[in-house]
Image (spheres, helix red, strand yellow):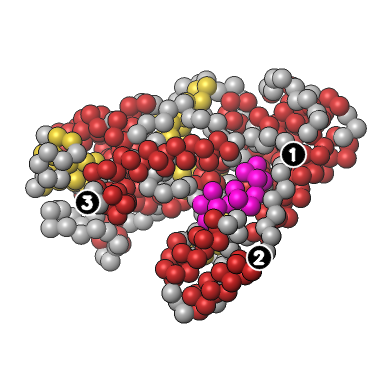
Amino acid sequence: MIKITNTLTGNKEEFKPYNQNSVLMYVCGITPYDDAHIGHGRVYISFDVISRLFRLFGYDVQYCRNFTDIDDKLLNKAEAEFGDRLRYQEISERYIARYHQDVAALGCLPPTYEPRVTRCIPEIIRFIQGLIDAGKAYESEGDVYFSIATFPAYGALSKRHVEDLQVGARVQVSDKKRDPLDFALWKSEPEGTFWKSPWGYGRPGWHIECSAMAKQFLGEHIDIHGGGLDLIFPHHENEIAQSEALYGAPFARYWVHNGMVRIDQEKMSKSLGNFFTLRDLFKQFDPMVLRYYIIAHHYRAPLDFAFDDIKAIEKSYKRLVRIFNDVIADPELDLTAVAKSDVAQRMIDFLADDINTPGAFGVLFDALGDIQKNESELRLIKGILQHIFGLSLQPIAEQEVVMTTEIEQKLAEREEARLAKDWARADAIRQQLVDMGVPVNDKRS
């Protein structure tokens, strides 16, 4: 039995899927306009572990993770880089390829489905038309908006009241809307641009894509919808509204969210100079060390990222490598094999209790001395570490930054820029340092 915290109810609940032997799971993917960062890494490692655990329990996991490959950020990047916003696909192709490399390095298994918005436009248009036909959405000068007034349950996921949101809420205001809270399903574009629809040429709004792709690949009702806490409002709230307005029934049975990554108690942000891509970090740390660092923390808790903490946990990972590197893991791992070992069973019991990875590691390290005396136990535990935690347990190459006069000078220049609050220059120098293999962890003064 697996228990998992449902954001919708706020409770830890026994997992009961719609279909007895399968798990339908949708996790929001990236907008590929830049390299994936440590926050992305946490999301996809967390749900990779979750999907692996369900498979151990005998479920057929159908895991869908999308790419938002048409978006204002992509269009703006194409305009800045090529002087032509219509070359956005060149941007998305570049960063999708790099993303695949990054998550593979982190040991994440490929999802069952990996749809792109640009390849699902007919389904999105049909979904929007269905909402219009049901009286839940309306066309306005080529745009289409969802009408919040038609969905009384709006705000249930984020625990917000419509009345409070309407007074001073940070929403995009438009004269085309009937209500300031109404959100775009379709955005109009000049004649002949992007895709032709019943409402004219245009492109999808952000929120509609996930509802439509979940329906296309998993069906109208899914078991788990996941992502980072920052997606609860408005993205996931809007998904619930548009999906349940169309179906007249619950969209996802369980809403699962991982905690945010914070730097010095603050949200990671490019403007604060505390933004780290996975590729930045791979230059200093083995990807498996980063994976181990992330799963050593409970997926729902905030992760206070710090380089010193990664260096400390790297020593722990190297200890596991020394113990398990030459051990041959059992070829098959199932609950029957797990039940033969008290240590293995207690580790899995912690994982089954809301994916408590820190608790499982606690069991492991408490018993590590005894485990090393038992070859069959070593083989079984290595199987858990590899197949459920996704750790390769291969020796890692030593990476050492040699401090040079050039590096010291750039560090000094960057500190001067930060003191002068010249954030653009400070960010530019930070990227130069990262390219030299010197990630910088700032502490704001």
Q: Name the residue under label 2.
A: 404
| Residue 411 percent across, percent down from the top left | 58, 70
Which type of secondary structure does the marked residue at label 2 adopt? Answer: loop
**Residue plotted at (31% across, 52% down):** 81
Instruction: Kindly identify which numbered label has been placed on residue 182.
Output: 3
Q: How far apart are marks 3 and 2 (CA)?
A: 55 Å
Looking at the image, is mark 2 or mark 1 earlier in the sequence? 1
* Mark whose residue sits in front, 2 or 1: 2
Residue 122 percent across, percent down from the top left: 23, 29
Label 3 vs label 2, nearer the camera: 2
Q: Which residue is labeled 1 in the image?
A: 395
Pointer 3 or 2: first along the chain: 3
Report, in whole angstroms, how far the alpha carbon at label 2 lies from the one at label 1.
28 Å
| Residue 169 magenta-highlighted | no
Position of residue 196 in the picture relative to residue 48 (left or right): left
**In this rendering, does residue 127 appear at all?**
no
Question: Would you say 205 lies left or right of 384 here?
Answer: left
Instruction: Please indicate whether residue 381 sits to the left or right of residue 207 in the image.
Output: right
Residue at 72% over, 51% down: 313
- Residue type at mark 1 is Pro
Q: Against 366, is 162 above or below?
A: below
In terms of depth relative to the viewer, which is nearer, 393 or 22? 393
Residue density around tag 2, few if under 14, some if 14–19, many if 20 or more, within 10 Å:
few
> Which residues lie in the magenta part?
276-289
